Image: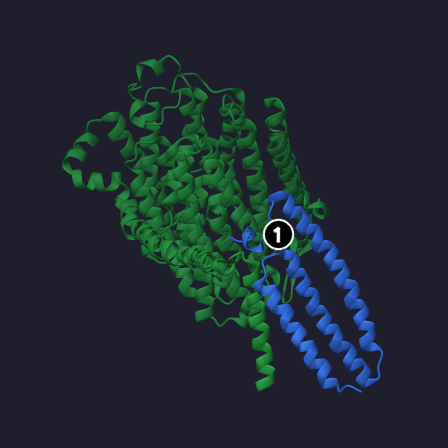
Chain colours: A green, B blue
């Protein structure tokens, strides 16, 4: 399969072409068989490629394939080439595997939609772009995938484009992402001017020589790259687009805005770990931003009332964990959390989609409750997802989150404060997830009358995806059981060749810590998770009057958090409104005044000049003849008198 | 033997008469005749120079001028006739359609 690696991204592209061109003309069954089948094939291809990679010795697990020369322009020679190493192998498995399940889920969820072909065409295009992003062997091709997923995100958020909220959310996502992309582009140009190439392999080999450790250049490049990552992966300060992105269809939120696209930033930071390790300042910033985002977003998630928005803030928070891991040099732990998060967050989103489906489009958790018995499979899978994300011992999220928290504490770049932020965010996570679960499924029913008797379990295509993802959320963590719990941390050792391939200066592994400390921290995070669950149970099931009392007690604090700390309004006042004013001003003065004025002046001038000069054409032949005579005499006189 | 200067003076006088005719007459036929006069004044100076320089070039040129003049008159008269048919007048001062 390695020699035909290009087939993996090419297959979804074929699906996109088919559904994009013929989606309206063929029956629905053909549309989804093609779309799902082709992603399934890509998943099979990814599995085969993964097997072939495993058959190689650990150090040789690095495969590149050059397809064709794309831009031969002087010094800039860009080839379209793919690169498969353990890191990209993990990513293509996640993208095609989770992507396949979500495609299947979409068959049921989108069944009654008009633009069926359009939807699946976009999904396939997204899969293609995401695979290009993770398989690219140079920055420019990665950027193509990077922009491609951004485009698909925009298109799919605005899938119901006749709804103004959806169209606005799509535009917001696109514009905010452009800010990040701008940083990515600048970083790419700096890298090219410094290294003369954009290929990852050559850059990373040269980097320790070309860049000084902790130098300005290394810091600038990595900070610009990280700006790109904050845009794509919704971190402070560019996270504001992700909650709004929930206007898109729920499977899209699961695929793009939870499992795959938003993790592109984490993948990119891990891919460029050589550069980041050369810039300790940038690494520290990555860690701090990650920890802050994790806590900040989790705190907003505590009080949101829209089932999908709670999950959106949860996603932002979990992405913060991944960056925290990368920022303390534990790239493998970040990628591990990325993988498990893809399982349980896709599961939670799809579960919320199933709830919304059952309640005929209701998304407000204040109008849910008591539906666990009516949709048992959705309930059980959702419970598994919630336990996994809360870090309940034995489930996927427990292993990956604990790994990150441990690294945040023990790594030389880590600190107790980062760990504390992480643990506090874990407490919030457990709390808001179980608040969501209890309000949605348990307690008394607050469902509106006309929706009450419609409640029904989802079709098999949707349940299939839910059950598989639930299984993965249970067992997914066992690929990375840490040594302290008797595991070998297979995942980390599988990824290790990626992070030891290039000579790096920064230390990757932590110092020596006593075993008892690791046990203590482990128990603390378990205790915190259980405490969060218990609190949610107490507040929302046992004594469900307390939350309202608390709101009454601290109204301003509640308002502040409910309104997402007014960040949107602050950005609006600081950036959007001045920007709009500036553009109105330039439109009035510069565009209408100078640009249009210049054009109009040229036109006016020619017209006026013609008006004046046309008097010369008086129409009398004899006067013309006289003019000729006078002119001839003048010429004659000039030659005679010279 | 008449000196060349006299030929040139005669030629200049004839040319000036032709120019005056073109400018002051209103009848296009007379204007045409005046143009012929100008052409022939030029022909005269061609001949004068040819005999002075002992070269046939000037005389050959005269043949060309006469051929072109004949063609020009043919076309010009045709135009004048058709204008006359259209407007029953051939006064050049009334022909001022070719302006803004």
Write down the quadrant of residue A157 in the picture: top left
Instruction: Classify residue A20 by image quadrant.
Output: top right
Left or right: A31, with A408 as reference point: right
Query: Looking at the image, which residue is at 29% across and 26% down?
Result: A366
Task: Tell me residue A128's x, y (percent).
Answer: 59, 42
Which sits in the foreground, A115 or A194?
A115
Q: Secondary structure at mark 1?
A: loop
Give residue A557's position: percent from left, percent from top.
19, 42
The chain letter for the residue carrying disc 1 is: A
Quadrant of the image for the C terminus of chain A?
A: bottom right
Tell me, yes or no, if residue A344 can be seen here.
no
Q: On the rendered structure, is A512 left or right of B17?
A: left
Q: Which residue is mark 1?
A: A85
Q: Quadrant of the N terminus of chain A?
A: top right
Q: Would you call the spot at circle 1 few (<14 residues within 10 Å), some (14-19), or many (20 or more)?
A: many
Choose between A610 and A406: the one closer to the eye.
Answer: A610
Percent of width and height locating residue B24: 57, 64
Q: Nearer the viewer, residue B1 or A169?
A: B1
């Amino acid at each position: 399969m390695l020699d035909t690696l290009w087939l993996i991204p090419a297959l979804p592209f074929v699906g996109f072409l088919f559904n994009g061109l013929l989606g309206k003309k063929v029956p629905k069954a053909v549309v989804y068989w093609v779309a799902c089948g082709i992603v399934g094939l890509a998943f099979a291809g990814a599995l085969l490629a993964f097997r072939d990679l495993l058959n190689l010795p650990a150090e040789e697990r690095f495969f590149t394939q050059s397809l064709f020369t794309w831009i031969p322009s002087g010094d800039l020679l860009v080839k379209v080439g793919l690169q498969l190493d353990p890191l990209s192998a993990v990513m293509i498995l996640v993208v095609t595997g989770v992507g396949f399940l979500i495609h299947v889920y979409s068959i049921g969820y989108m069944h009654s939609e008009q633009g069926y072909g359009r939807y699946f065409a976009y999904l396939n295009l997204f899969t293609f772009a995401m695979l290009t992003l993770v398989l690219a062997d140079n920055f420019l091709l990665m950027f193509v995938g990077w922009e491609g997923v951004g485009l698909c995100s925009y298109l799919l958020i605005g899938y119901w484009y006749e709804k103004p909220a959806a169209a606005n959310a799509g535009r917001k996502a696109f514009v905010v992402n452009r800010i990040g992309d701008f940083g990515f582009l600048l970083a790419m140009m700096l890298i090219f001017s410094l290294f003369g190439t954009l290929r990852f392999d050559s850059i990373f080999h040269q980097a320790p020589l070309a860049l000084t450790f902790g130098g300005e250049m290394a810091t600038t490049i990595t900070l610009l790259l990280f700006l790109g990552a904050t845009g794509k992966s919704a971190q402070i300060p560019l996270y504001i687009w992700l909650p709004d992105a929930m206007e898109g269809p729920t499977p899209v939120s699961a695929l793009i805005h939870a499992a795959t696209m938003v993790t592109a930033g984490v993948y990119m930071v891990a891919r460029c770990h050589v550069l980041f390790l050369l810039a300790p300042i940038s690494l520290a910033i990555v860690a701090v931003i990650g920890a802050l985002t994790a806590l900040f977003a989790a705190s907003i998630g505590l009080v949101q009332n829209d089932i999908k928005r709670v999950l959106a803030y949860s996603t932002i928070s979990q992405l913060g964990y991944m960056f925290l891991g990368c920022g303390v040099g534990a790239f493998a732990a970040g990628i591990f959390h990325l993988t498990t998060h893809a399982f349980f967050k896709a599961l939670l989103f799809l579960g919320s989609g199933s709830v919304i489906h059952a309640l005929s489009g209701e998304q407000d958790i204040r109008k849910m409750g008591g539906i666990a018995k009516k949709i048992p499979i959705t309930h059980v899978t959702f419970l598994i997802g919630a336990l996994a994300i809360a870090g309940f011992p034995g489930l996927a999220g427990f292993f990956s989150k604990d790994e990150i928290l441990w690294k945040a504490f023990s790594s030389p770049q880590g600190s107790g404060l980062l760990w504390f932020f992480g643990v506090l965010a874990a407490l919030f996570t457990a709390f808001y997830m179980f608040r969501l679960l209890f309000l949605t499924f348990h307690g008394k029913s607050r469902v509106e009358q006309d929706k009450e008797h419609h409640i029904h379990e989802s079709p098999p295509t949707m349940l299939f995806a839910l059950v598989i993802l639930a299984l993965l959320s249970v067992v997914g963590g066992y690929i990375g059981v840490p040594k302290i719990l008797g595991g070998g941390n297979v995942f980390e050792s599988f990824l290790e060749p990626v992070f030891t391939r290039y000579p790096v200066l920064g230390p990757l592994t932590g110092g020596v810590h006593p075993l008892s400390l690791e046990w203590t921290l482990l128990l603390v995070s378990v205790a915190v998770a259980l405490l969060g669950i218990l609190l949610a149970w107490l507040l929302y099931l046992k004594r469900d009057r307390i939350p309202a009392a608390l709101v009454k007690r601290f109204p301003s604090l509640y308002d502040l958090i409910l309104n997402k700390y007014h960040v949107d309004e602050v950005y609006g006042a600081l950036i959007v409104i001045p920007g709009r004013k500036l553009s109105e001003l330039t439109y009035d003065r510069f565009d209408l005044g100078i640009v249009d004025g210049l054009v109009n002046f040229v036109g006016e001038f020619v017209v006026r000049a013609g008006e004046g000069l046309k008097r010369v054409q008086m129409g009398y032949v004899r006067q013309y003849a006289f003019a000729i005579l006078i002119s001839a005499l003048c010429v004659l006189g000039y030659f005679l008198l010279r | 033997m008449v000196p060349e200067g006299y030929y040139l003076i005669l030629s200049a006088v004839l040319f000036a008469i032709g120019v005056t005719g073109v400018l002051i007459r209103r009848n296009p036929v007379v204007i045409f005749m005046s143009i012929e006069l100008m052409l022939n004044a030029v022909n005269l100076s061609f001949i004068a120079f040819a005999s002075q320089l002992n070269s046939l070039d000037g005389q050959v040129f005269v043949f060309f001028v006469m051929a072109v003049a004949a063609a020009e008159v043919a076309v010009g008269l045709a135009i004048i006739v058709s204008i006359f048919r259209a407007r029953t007048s051939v006064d050049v001062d009334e022909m001022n359609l070719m302006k803004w």
